[in-house]
Image (cartoon, rainbow, N blue to C red):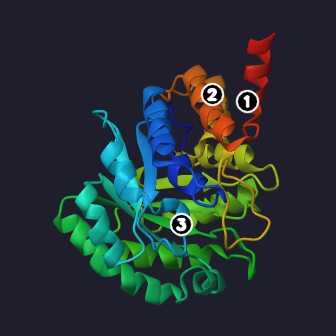
Amino acid sequence: MSIPSKVRLIDVGPRDGLQNEKQPVPAAVKIELVHRLQAAGIKEIEVTSYVSPKWVPQMADNHEVMAGLTRQSGVRYSVLTPNLKGYEAAVLDKPDEIVVFGAASEAFSQKNINCSIAESIDRFAPVVAAAKAAGIAVRGAMSCTVGCPYEGEIAPERVAYLAGLMKGIGVERVDVADTIGVGTPRKVQAAIEAALHHFGIDQISGHFHDTYGQALSNTLAALELGVWNFQSSVAGLGGCPYAKGATGNVATEDVVYLLHGMGIHTGIDLDALVDAGQFISEYLGRPSGSRVARALLAKRAG
């Protein structure tokens, strides 16, 4: 397939990026971050999750954050729901999309959500059914599709297995995630090709971490297959609490710079995006995780 002429980015910074921060991030700061992202042209934003505050205290303000948003027409606001209880809490806040999640690794599934892959799908089936009945879109996050901190390399067949299970319960699109950032281009392409056994190219997104500096290479490899949906995190925020050594998601700023340099349309204002990343980085008291943002900010400073 030819490289796409346009790309849609889903910024996961407000949820995936901030969920592991040790210092509390006030709801007002999260709301401002979402507003800045949508003002920069981001059309899909993963806002929060409805999980037990005991496990993810950073997301305990989910209702406050969702209620505080000034929603922009044409922007999709998604939330993570781990079970039916989480969905029932989420639906009160009228998300446009709910996200369920599973792993291509049995060991990771057990460590992450204390059940097998098959059991996780059984748990999500009523969530998906309820969401679809309510007219809410459903996305499935597939983690550890290339490598696992416990099992090592993951065979593409495991990705196809998980994708098939998700398709079977009615998930509409899936993320192929290199959760610990060990993927390289050919391995990432193999994982995507496995997902293509069950989902069309329009229903697959790439989600890459930059642990070994391969995230942009893997983005290009996915583009070469025709993938045009990607997830990224402003300022490179985020990691995974169950994946030791995993660093942040690929920075949205870095992906946008790559895409614009290739002549691919995103509808995103890079300067405004850099400002959004600088806003949250300054609040957290550390430099942006985006190389592009740091370079552009240095250039601005003269």
Circle nearer the viewer, 1 or 3: 3
Q: Position of residue 273 (x, y in %)?
A: 57, 28
- Which quadrant: the N terminus? top right
Give the alpha-carbon distance from disc 3 to disc 2, as whole Å: 27 Å
Element at badge 3? helix
Going by the numbered disc 3, the residue's amino acid type is Pro
Which residue corresponds to the image point at 56% horizontal and 61% vertical from the top-left?
176
The answer to whether marks 2 and 1 mark residues whose Cβ atoms lie closer than 8 Å is: yes
The quarter of the displayed image where residue 48 is located? bottom left
Q: Which mark is residue 138?
A: none
Give the alpha-carbon distance from disc 2 to disc 1, as whole Å: 8 Å
Give the alpha-carbon distance from disc 1 to disc 3, as whole Å: 31 Å
N-terminal of the pair, mark 3 or mark 2, is 3
Q: Residue under label 3, please give it.
A: 57
Q: Is residue 89 visible?
A: yes
The quarter of the displayed image where residue 287 is located? top right
Near mark 2 (Cα within 10 A), the count class, few <14, some 14-19 or many ≥20, is: many
Vertical position of residue 42 compared to residue 295: above or below: below
Which residue corresponds to the image point at 30% horizontal and 37% vertical from the top-left?
71
Q: Is residue 267 visible?
A: no
Q: Residue under label 1, please give it.
A: 292
The answer to whether marks 3 and 2 mark residues whose Cβ atoms lie closer than 8 Å is: no
Circle nearer the viewer, 3 or 2: 3
Q: Residue under label 2, please give it.
A: 274
Near mark 1 (Cα within 10 A), the count class, few <14, some 14-19 or many ≥20, is: many
Going by the numbered disc 1, the residue's amino acid type is Val
